[in-house]
Image (cartoon, rainbow, N blue to C red):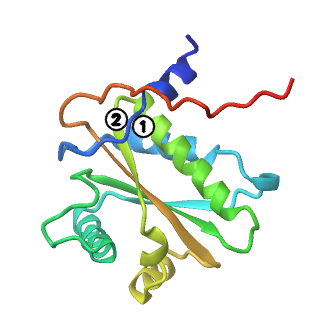
Amino acid sequence: MNEIINAMEERRSIRKFRSDMPSKDDIRLIIDAGLYAASGMGKQSSIVIAVTNKELRDKISKDNCKIGGWGEDFDPFYGAPVILIVLANKDIPTYVYDGSLMMGNLMNAAHSLGLGSIWIHRAKEEFEQDGYKKLLKDLGIEGNYEGIGHCAIGYIDGENPSKPSRNEGRVFWCE
């Protein structure tokens, strides 16, 4: 089978990560794959904030947890040491789709490098808060950005889940 299609079929959302940090080279390769995601009219409206700083990662986790309504001891990133936050420019009509395609590329790239990933929501709500708007400003990011998602990445703690069967009745042919 084709290597890319095989990777897409094998990739699973991971909910238990080891604490050891992936190499910066691997993180860069994953980000580069995200930057090559298709985008409406080639506008490339999506950006990535790569969070490898543990203190910031833990703060984002706590804030995400509050937004999600979980207890303080829950980590919505499942211990992943790397959080790639995707935001997209709301002035571009296809921004949500562009950011979503980037998220897919990030997850597939992580899998291709032997890393696990999971898409975690609530980036939109985080980046509506003043503290996260300040983070964007501190990073020199200007524009009308909305959080699309967090791609939590790390080494899988355990085995990669097996691929489940696909639901029937989802393909319709017009021949």
Q: Nearer the viewer, residue 76 or 34?
A: 76
- Whether 128 is drawn above or below 148: the answer is below
- Residue 136 can be seen in this image: yes
Give the alpha-carbon distance from disc 1 to disc 2, as whole Å. Answer: 5 Å
Image quarter where the N terminus lies is top right
Residue 73 left/right relative to 156: left
Q: Which residue is mark 1?
A: 110
Under circle 2, the secondary element is loop
Kindly identify the residue that appears in the image at 44 percent across and 28 percent down: 112
Kindly identify the residue that appears in the image at 33 percent across and 38 percent down: 116
- Residue 32 can be seen in this image: no
Under circle 1, the secondary element is helix
Quadrant of the image occupied by residue 173 = top right
- Whether 78 is drawn above or below 109: the answer is below
Q: Position of residue 151 (x, y in %)?
A: 42, 52
- Whether 94 is drawn above or below 4: the answer is below
Q: Position of residue 50 (x, y in %)?
A: 42, 58
Is there CB contact under 8 Å for labels 1 and 2? Answer: yes
Three-letter residue code for mark 2:
Leu
Three-letter residue code for mark 1:
Ala
Q: Which residue is mark 2?
A: 115
Q: Nearer the viewer, residue 93 or 19?
A: 93
Image quarter where the C terminus lies is top right
